[in-house]
Amino acid sequence: MTTQVEHARNGIITAQMEEVARSEGVDMGSLLSSVAQGSAVIMCRDGKTVGIGKGLRTKVNVNIGTSSLKIDPDEEVRKAIIGEKYGADTLSDLSMGGDITEIRKKILENTTIPLTTVPIYQTAAQIGLENMTEDDLLRNLARQAEEGVSSFVLHCTDSATLNMLKDKERILGVVSKAGLLPALIWHQ
């Protein structure tokens, strides 16, 4: 499967790029350049196309998702439906509790706008931080892509960066839960 960025880097204008340029009122050449450079992305799902990034209008994303303490799949689906009804451009499912695959399936069945996930959340919830491997994370990411997820939030780092941060005095700790998980795994 060729991605929008690969098409843009090869100078190929896709139907999705044409749709974004038309709906955003931007020049195709500028959009093609922004996508090729990675300063804009095109998210697609069920015939819905959304451009996000440089030179494009501001978008609204709705964060939804269960925790290990509050698991109500129907409530998350209701939130997703309400978000889409009132104009959200995208959804992010941040679920970390319950049957996350089933929750995501219900969200996908009841909405049409692009959906983003954080694969490390489901991997950690199902396998546990102490047992999770890179292969587990990659398998989960591939499974979610096959299910129809439009994009992923990935928190990537390496031991050199983590070692540098360990020796530096920080004003705050890691403020992103998904960013904290790789640091916790490394620190064990």
Image (cartoon, rainbow, N blue to C red):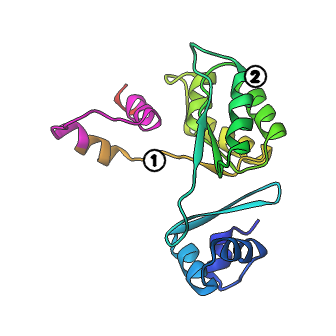
Residue 186 quadrant: top left
Question: Mark 2 or mark 1, which has the lower sequence index?
Answer: 2
Three-letter amino acid code of the residue under disc 1: Cys
Residue 157 placement, left or right of 127? left
Residue 114 placement, left or right of 40? right
Q: Residue at x 60, y 86 (%)?
A: 29
- Look at the numbered discs 2 and 1 and tell me whether their residues touch, using CB distance below 8 Å: no
- Tell me the crowding category of disc 1: few under 14, some 14 to 19, or many 20 or more residues within 10 angstroms, Cα based: few
User: Vertical placement of 183 versus 188: above or below?
Assistant: below
Q: Which mark is residue 132?
A: none
Q: Which residue is farthest left?
A: 169
Span of residues in magenta: 165-185
- Tell me the crowding category of disc 2: few under 14, some 14 to 19, or many 20 or more residues within 10 angstroms, Cα based: few
Rendered location of residue 18, percent (x, y): 73, 77
Locate the C terminus and report the quarter of the image it occupies. top left
Three-letter amino acid code of the residue under disc 2: Asp
Magenta span contains residue 170: yes
Judging depth in this view, the residue of 86 and 147 nearest the camera is: 86
Locate the N terminus and report the quarter of the image it occupies. bottom right
Residue 3 quadrant: bottom right
Judging depth in this view, the residue of 136 and 37 nearest the camera is: 37
Provide the secondary structure element on which disc 1 rests: loop
Q: Residue at x 82, y 54 (%)?
A: 46
Rendered location of residue 49, percent (x, y): 73, 62
Residue carrying label 2: 74
Magenta span contains residue 123: no
Q: Which mark is residue 156?
A: 1
